Image (cartoon, rainbow, N blue to C red):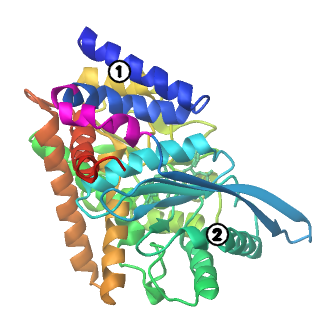
Amino acid sequence: MNATISSEVEKFLKGLVRRNPHEIEFHQAVREVVESLMPFVLEHQVYREAQILERMTEPDRIVSFRVTWEDDSGSIRANRAYRVQFNNSIGPYKGGLRFHPTVTQSVLKFLGFEQVLKNSLTGLPMGGAKGGANFNPKGKSDREVMRFCQSLMTELHRHIGENTDVPAGDIGVGAREISYLFGQYKRLENRFTGILTGKGLSFGGSLVRKEATGYGCIYFCENMFNQAGDSIKGKTVSVSGSGNVALYAIEKAHSMGAKVVTASDSSGTIHDPEGIDYEKLDFLKDLKEVKRGRIHEYAQKYPAATFLEKQRPWQVPVDIALPCATQNEIDQNDAELLLKNGVKAVCEGANMPTELDAVRQFLRAKILYGPAKAANAGGVAVSGLEQSQNALRLSWSRDEVDTKLHTIMKDIHQKCLEHGKQGDFVNYVDGANIAGFIKVADAMVAYGAV
Ligand code: NDP
Ligand code: 2IT
């Protein structure tokens, strides 16, 4: 970065930090994007004159509200929930809901901001939003989760709509929670309509939505390898997490001939040098999707595996690392270790899983680095397809949806090449940021001062 660009970046970020004090995750997400975009924006005065960067980093609105509910012992409990409606320039707001004790306004602003660019990359008409609550579903009964979801929707329903804002799942929000939320919306509004995605297949859900983020991440990874004249076939892979994204990334990687040797949760990592095959994956799915158990149970069931308590997977030597759990789960030391052990690709299923300094290490080392907003866009893309099917009152077949997902991931990869090719090296960070930005920025310029 030359001196002028770097001073513009620092000036911009100083203002952002002043306007949004203490929101460190939001600062991090914006810094990564602005470092990519500043040279482009300086070359295109139209964006500068319209103050696009300043406007794009200010959410359209944030709704914050109390969620009061009753636990199984009859005690009254209260949580804080939000919906950050970030930008609807190219379509209705769209993005997940997260239930996790670490949810803050800063976390949801970083996620909402990234969602705007990610959704733009999919090529579908979707704006960006994120929401959630500092509610911990772990250890809660189904009935407690139901009462929480109903209470949350009792407020949220007035802020969403099929042409306004369409939430979906994220950490701690899966099929069970979406069903409770949808049921309550329908009861309050007396309308059966596609106001959430990730719904059950019997009430408007799309085939392949559950698998879409994980599958899409592997399709993107394969595109990166193909571009480099290689393939994921025969490669060893580490995956973090064992939730929605991780499980289906493991499934697709295995089906394409790679060997996945780790999975994890917040208590630790299992390392299975023999690889997670379909049978073991079925065990994991049942453990995580049905029984809501802990990852160490895998090592009890399969003695070839070891349980690395309280550790992340990045010490295990692999060709491909797929962070699929949460933000900032790869720090500089992890990046160093991965590189030392010869990692060829890091492809992000989770949102912002890599700290900024670690991202820079990967870029300097010129490995294949697929940033979240490109690599995990498959989930929201199939959510977009679910919205289309709901609007048409039709359901597409598994093959139809999967083929569309394939094409969308290939197109995203192509857009990254268009804007991120630097000689022989592809900087997918710049590519994704610039390609995602242009469509939203052009719409904002066209609207004038709104
Ligand atoms: P799930 O709730 O299904 O699974 C999350 C997994 O990550 C669990 O194994 C969980 O372990 C682990 N995890 C969560 N927080 C932490 C933490 N602080 N430290 C260690 N492990 C943690 O969520 P998803 O799979 O849906 O989401 C995973 C990531 O993918 C998130 O970054 C999300 O934003 C992103 N994403 C999700 C999409 C979707 O469609 N669901 C789409 C695109 C991105 P434990 O159970 O112990 O908490
Ligand atoms: O981060 C994400 O893209 C998601 N959690 C999915 C959002 C969606 O609307 O499907």
Q: Residue shown at 37%/78% (left/top)?
A: 206
How many marks the image carries: the answer is: 2
On the question of residue 105 being in view, the answer is yes
Determine the image quadrant of residue 318: top left
Spot occupied by residue 25 in the image (x, y as percentages of width and height): 53, 35
Residue type marked 2 = Lys
Residue tagged 2: 291
Crowdedness of circle 1 by 10 Å Cα count: few (<14), some, many (20+)?
some
Viewed as shown, does residue 184 lie left or right of 222? right
Outermost right residue: 74
Mark 2 or mark 1: which comes first in sequence? 1
* Residue at image coords 65%, 52%: 100
Overall secondary structure of the magenta section:
helix
> Residue 408 or 52: which is nearer the viewer?
52
Which amino acid type is shown beneath numbered disc 1?
A: Val
Q: Secondary structure at mark 1?
A: helix
In the image as oriented, which residue stretches furthest toward the front?
A: 449
Is the CB of the residue bearing disc 1 within 8 angstroms of ligand 2?
no
Q: Which residues are magenta?
A: 42-57
Which residue is disc 1 drawn over? 9
Q: Residue at left 42%, top 39%?
A: 57
Measured from the top left, where is residue 364 in percent x and y? 27, 20
Q: Is residue 262 visible?
A: no
Q: Position of residue 110 (x, y in %)?
A: 49, 42
Q: Nearer the viewer, mark 2 or mark 1?
A: 1
Q: Compared to 306, does 83 lie above or below?
A: below
On whether residue 306 falls in the magenta region, the answer is no
Q: Quadrant of residue 64?
A: bottom right
* 96 horizontally vs 422: left or right: right
